[in-house]
Amino acid sequence: MKGQTYMIEAIISISIMISVFLLLFFFTPQFPEMSELNYKLRIKDALENLDNLNLRDKVYSNDVNYIENYLKMVLPKNIRFDVVIYDKNNALTTEPTIFSPFVFSTSYYIAGDYDKFFPREIRVYVWGYR
């Protein structure tokens, strides 16, 4: 009886050691690519930084090229994006035509300047990240 117990313990310990060995050396962990949430956070941070400079002037003059050029410096090169400026009723700049099934957008709102109340939404459409 005592020999059978040692044999079962040996089999269990060998199977645990083999499974740990297989997990450590044959299954490499998959590192996720940058997720949508990470992109949204980077875009939001970039627009906040730009808002400390001169974002409001560029938005009120509908200068999306300036915003897109700034985002090109901040975001990875492999993604595609387009910036659209909205007022409270409609788009003030052209909306993109996107044929990708993987699209998300993130918005950044500004309410106005010191004495003006002109709410605007800056919406950044992102695709091509997968």
Image (spheres, helix red, strand yellow):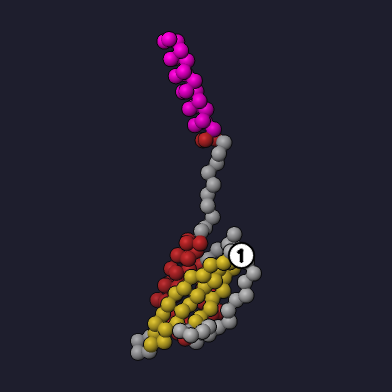
Relative horizontal placement of residue 57, taking residue 22 as reference (left or right): left
Badge 1 amino acid:
Pro
Q: Which of 11 and 56 is in front in this view?
A: 11
**Which residue is most to the right?**
99
Q: Is residue 3 magenta?
A: yes
Side of 49 relative to 100 (left or right): left
Locate residue 105, reporting x and y percent: 51, 70
Q: 73 and 21: which one is in front?
A: 21
Which residue is drawn at the image coordinates 52% and 35% (left, top)? 23
Specify the quadrant that holds the N terminus.
Answer: top left
Label 1 Cα neighbours within 10 Å, binned few <14 / some 14-19 / many ≥20: few
Q: Which residue is drawn at 54% across and 35% down?
A: 25
Circle 1: element type: loop
**Which quarter shows the C terminus?**
bottom right
Q: Is the magenta stretch mostly helix, strand or loop?
A: helix
Classify 68 as above or below 2: below
User: Who's the residue at 54% across and 76% down the image?
Assistant: 83
Q: Is residue 121 above or below residue 100?
A: below
Q: Where is residue 101 in the image (x, y as percent from the top left)?
A: 61, 65
- 7 over 27 or under it: above or below: above
Residue 59 counted in the magenta span: no
Magenta part of the protein: which range? 1-22
Which residue is denoted by mark 1 in the rendering?
A: 101
Residue 122 on image: x %, y %: 48, 77
Q: Is residue 58 visible?
A: no
Q: Which of 58 and 81 is in front in this view?
A: 81
